[in-house]
Amino acid sequence: MSWVKRVSRITAIAGVICLALIGIVVTSLNLSEPLDRKLLDAEFRLLRANFPRPAPEVVVVGVDEATVAQFYEPITLWHPHIAKLLTAMMQAKPAAVGIDLVLPDRSYDRVVPGYDVALLKSIVQARRAFPVVLALTIDPTGKPRPIHRPFLTAAGDGGTGYALLPVDADGIVRRFDERLGEGGAAVPTLVGQISRRLGIEPEPGLIDYGRGAAFDYLPLHRVLEWFDSGKQLELERAFAGKPVLLGVVLPFDDRQSLPVALAAWEQNTRIPGVLLHAQALRTLIGHGSIQPAASTLVMLLSVAAAFLWMTPARRLIALLAFSIAVTAILFASIWLLSAGWFLPVVAPLGVACFAVGGRIAYEALLQLRERRRLRSAFAGYVSPPIMDEILTGQLQPDLGGTSKYVCVMFADIRGYTTRSESMTPHAVIAFLNRYFEQVVRIIHARGGSVVSFMGDGIMAIFGAPKPLANPCAEAFAAAREMLDYVRQFNTDTRAAGEMPIEIGIGLHGGEEVVGHVGSTMRHDYSAIGDVTNVAARLESLTKEVAYRLVFSKTVADELPDPQRVTSLGPVAIKGHSPVEVYGYDKI
C-alpha cells in the first residue's frame, strides 16, 4: 500500500472514531436535549396533521365566560353548582369524574348556613357510583395549599391528586411524572389518581400529543340546565362510560404551554390546564405514556452516522448518502414515536451533518492545498488561464482538442542570432528573461495564454482556454503594448551601453483546434491549424514590409478603432495563398 493511501485510510478511520465519540458523549451528557425537544414537538404536529390516530374520549366540562356570567357567586362559593354536577353525573353514569377546581381551605357555613353539606353529601354519594378525584394545588411558595378537611374526608383514600405536571426548561409541558416532591419523591396527581381508579397504573413518560382530536367542551351551565330539565338521555349520551374533567376554560386563567394546539375553539399552544390533564389522562388510559428509547440505540445510530465520513469525495454522492441517512433516521424516529417510543435523533443527525460536511470541507481543503502546490510548482510553466482550467478540472489531460475562435500571436526578436554570438550563454539567458518578463505579463493581462517559447520567439493564443469577447482586439492591444515596452526597453539598453532590439509580431484569427498536442507522457497545450501557420508567416513578413506588427484582414475587421493601421493589400506568403494584410508601426 502506498504512503498516500495509508495516510488516507488512517485519516478516514480517525474521522469515523472522532465523530462516533462525539455522538456518544453528546448522548451520554444529554447535550442535545433542547433540540431533541423541539424536534419532538415538530413530530407531534406532523402526526396530528397528517396521520391522525384515535384516543380514548375524555369529556371536558368547562367553566367559560357564559357560565361565569350565569352564576353570580365567585367560583370559591360554587358548592351548590359542583354538587348539582355530581348529582347529574350519577344519572349520566360516567367512568370517573375529576374536579379541576380547587376547593376552599375553610368552611363557609357561617356565611351561608349548611353551604358545605350539599357538596359533602354529593361527593359521598357520587363516590358510590363512580370514582371522584378532587384537585390539589400548591401556593406560590411551593407548599401544598390546604383544603377544608371534611372535603378530603368525603373524597376518601385516592380521592385527591395534585393538578400538576412537570414543566421542561423551555416552559412547555411534555411529560407525565409524579416524582414532583422533594428529592424526587412521588406525589399523587389528578390524572394519575383517576387512572388508578380506572384500574390502570400510570407510568412516567411523555404525553402522547400525537393522538386524539382537538378537545371541545360542554359548558357547565348547559350541563346543569340538562339536569334541571330532566334531559337524562342527553346526559347519558354525553357522559356515559367516559372519564369527565371539570375545569376552567377562560381566556386568561390557568393556562399551560404545550407542543401542539389542543383546543378546538382556538389555535393556541398555550391552552387551559384542564385540556392538558385531559390529554394526559387519555394517554394513560389509552396506549400509555411514550417511553424513551435506550440511549444505547441512540449511540449506535451516532456510530453508524459517523461512517458517512467514509463516503466518496464526490460532493453529489456524499449529499445523496447524507439525504438518505437523514431521511431514514427521521422516518425511524417518527415511526417509533407513533408506536410509543421516543428516539432522540439530534445527536445522530448532528454526527451525520458533521460527517458529510466535514468530509466535503476536508476534501476541499486538500484540493485547495494541492492546487496551491501545483500552482506554486508549475505556475512558471503554463500561463495562468491554462493553470486555472487545469486546477478547476475544466481542462482534461486527454490528447485532442476542441474547435474555438482564437487569435494567434507570434513575436520574434530581430537579429537575435547575431547578437547572441557576442554574448555568453548566461548573458543570453539573462537578456531573454529580462525581455520576456514584461512581454509575458502584457499577454496575460490581456487574457492571452503563452503556449511556447522558441528561443527568442514566443507564441500566444487569445480566446483559449479562457474565452474572450473579442480575441483579435485583445491580441492587437497586447501587441501594441509590447511595442511600447520594447521602446522603453531600448531606452534602458542604450543607457547601459548595449545594442537596442527590434521585434516583429504577426497576428491572425479564426477557428482553430485547441488542446493537448504530443504524447500521453509529454504534451503541450497549443493551437493547431491554418490560423497558426498564417500567424507565423505574418510574423516573418514583418521583415519584408518594414512594419513591426503585421496582421490579417480578419484581425483588422475586429478592431473597434483601427487608427494608424495601413492596408498592405493581398500579400503572397510562403506555402499559402495570398492573404490581405495590414501593417502597424512602420519601421
Image (cartoon, grey):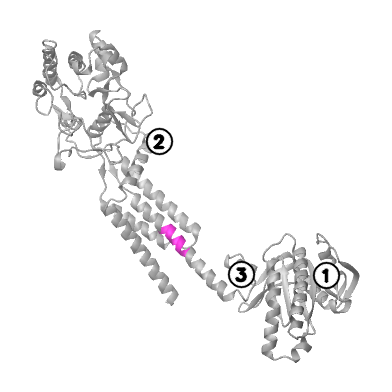
For mark 1, what is the residue?
Answer: 551
Disc 2 to disc 3: CB gap under 8 Å: no
> Label 2 near label 1: C-beta < 8 Å?
no
Label 3 sits on residue: 387
Range covered by the magenta-colored residues: 355-363
Decide whether the magenta segment is chiefly helix, strand or loop.
Answer: helix
Identity of the residue drawn at 37% across and 40% down = 42
**Badge 1 or badge 3: first in the primary sequence:** 3
Dot 2 falls on a residue whose secondary structure is helix
Q: Looking at the rendering, in which quadrant would you find the N terminus?
A: bottom left
Q: Residue 50, which numbered label?
A: 2
In this rendering, is residue 70 above or below 496? above
Q: CA distance from mark 1 to mark 2?
A: 74 Å
Picture residue at 18% right of the left edge, 38% below the top: 180
User: Can you tell which quarter of the image residue 176 is in?
Assistant: top left
| Disc 1/disc 3 C-alpha distance (Å) | 28 Å
Residue 414 visible at all: yes
- Judge whether residue 117 is colored magenta: no
Earlier-in-chain disc, 1 versus 2: 2
| Quadrant into which the C terminus falls | bottom right
Dot 1 lies on which element?
strand
User: What is the quadrant of residue 51 in the picture?
Assistant: top left
Where is residue 540 drawn, in percent x and y? 82, 78
Q: Residues within 10 Å of mark 1 (few under 14, many from 20)?
A: many
Q: Which amino acid type is shown beneath numbered disc 1?
A: Phe
| Front one among 56 and 44 | 44
